[in-house]
Image (cartoon, rainbow, N blue to C red):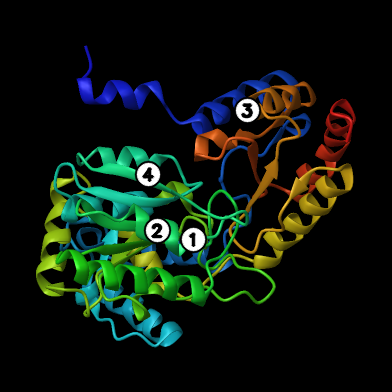
Amino acid sequence: MIAERMKPLMANNSAVRQMFEEGNNLRAKYGKENVFDFSLGNPDAPVPDEINQAIKDIVDETPVMELHGYMSNAGYEDVRETIACHLNKLHGTEFTKGNILMTVGAASALNVALKTILNPGEEVVVFAPYFLEYNWYIKNYDGVVVPCQTDENFMPDMGRLEACITEKTRAVLINSPHNPTGVVYSEEIIKGIAEVLDRKQKELGRTLFLIADEPYRELAYDGVEVPYVTKYYDNTFVVYSYSKSLSLPGERIGYLVVPPAMEDSEFVFETVTAVNRISGAVNAPAIQQKLIGRCVDSKVNLEYYDRNRKALYEGLTGCGFECVMPQGAFYLFVKSPVEDAAEFCQAAKKYNILMVNGASFMAPGYVRLAYCVSYETINNSMAGFKKLAEEYGL
């Protein structure tokens, strides 16, 4: 009844979303305060005050046709120029509105980039563990996912990366700060990736792209720097979303950067603009674009997440669980006390604790906890975690 190409995708439907639905069922049964749902990266941090005020002002001040009408498929020119100037100020880049495509969140930006560059059968190298919906996006354009294993600290290994690149490779997709591990790729790591791509690009005689998926860019702790990737490799797309930095996941607003140094940059930008239209999105939401134009410098309170990060890490390690302190994003990646992490996740449900099996991110033996929840949720969950630890003899 459904298309053949959709059947394998549906057979591996998102475990994160399934867990989200299970959380809704548990909340209905036991009450919200008694369910500790760490399954979904759905920000709980308050939206900055100026965001809510700006939305009201935009609606009150903007003529109806301008507020709700069509614009260029690339987005409002003034908003794109504002974002370009913002990035230039932060990172020393030289972007203009002609390098910024407004998109329906990061997922749309990723799909636009992939549709623009992928021919059937071409490969995209992705460092494992990774956000498993990358599989859907890449296969949707008849691409092939090539997982590249990281080291014991979840950092890319340049030798493994080079071995993964073949005459069929079209792109390498990176995510930093990282979902699900919380690691941040250092400048040294980014330079290493760029050097491998430069060398292989010349060796193979074909353009290789780097796609940097950066929805967690602003969520980095302890003074950790997140390198801006276009400074190290010319053929780089940057994917960005305001879902995490402004707590607006349901509003679906982000952008795609096509830097001026990219090969055939102007033609690539024309193409991504056309892809944005034919993908069905047509253009990014008008009100949300105008909102970003007014609030491009706004951010959520990083301390909100940092307090959660420390509380969850200290609480779980205090119980005897093994995990690495995350440098960014809002995820804690915990080693399962048993080989079968699915069993561990199932055991946690007895205490109304919801976690996601690391196998959903190509990392069996681990579980992911999203700490973008209330501080009270973390504190109240600790009694259940202690019982869970005792159950496994920790």
Q: Which mark is residue 116?
A: none
- Residue placed under numbered mark 4 in the picture: 134
1 or 4: mark nearer the eye: 1
4 or 3: mark nearer the eye: 4
Between discs 2 and 3, the one toward the N terminus: 3
4 or 2: mark nearer the eye: 2
- Residue placed under numbered mark 1 in the picture: 157
Between discs 1 and 4, the one toward the N terminus: 4
Q: CA distance from mark 3 to mark 1?
A: 36 Å
Between discs 4 and 3, the one toward the N terminus: 3
Is residue 233 visible to the viewer in this orientation of the structure? yes
Please tell me how crowded label 2 is: few (under 14), some (14-19), or many (20+) other residues with Cα within 10 Å: many
Q: CA distance from mark 1 to mark 4?
A: 20 Å
- Residue placed under numbered mark 2 in the picture: 161
Instruction: Give the residue at x 50% y 39%.
Output: 362
- Residue placed under numbered mark 3 in the picture: 23
Residue 26 screen position, x and y as percent: 67, 22
Residue 133 screen position, x and y as percent: 40, 40
Label 1 secondary element: loop
Contact, mark 1 vs mark 2 (Cβ under 8 Å): yes
Inspect the image, locate mark 2, and give the three-letter code of the amino acid beneath it.
Leu
Report the quarter where the C terminus lies: top right
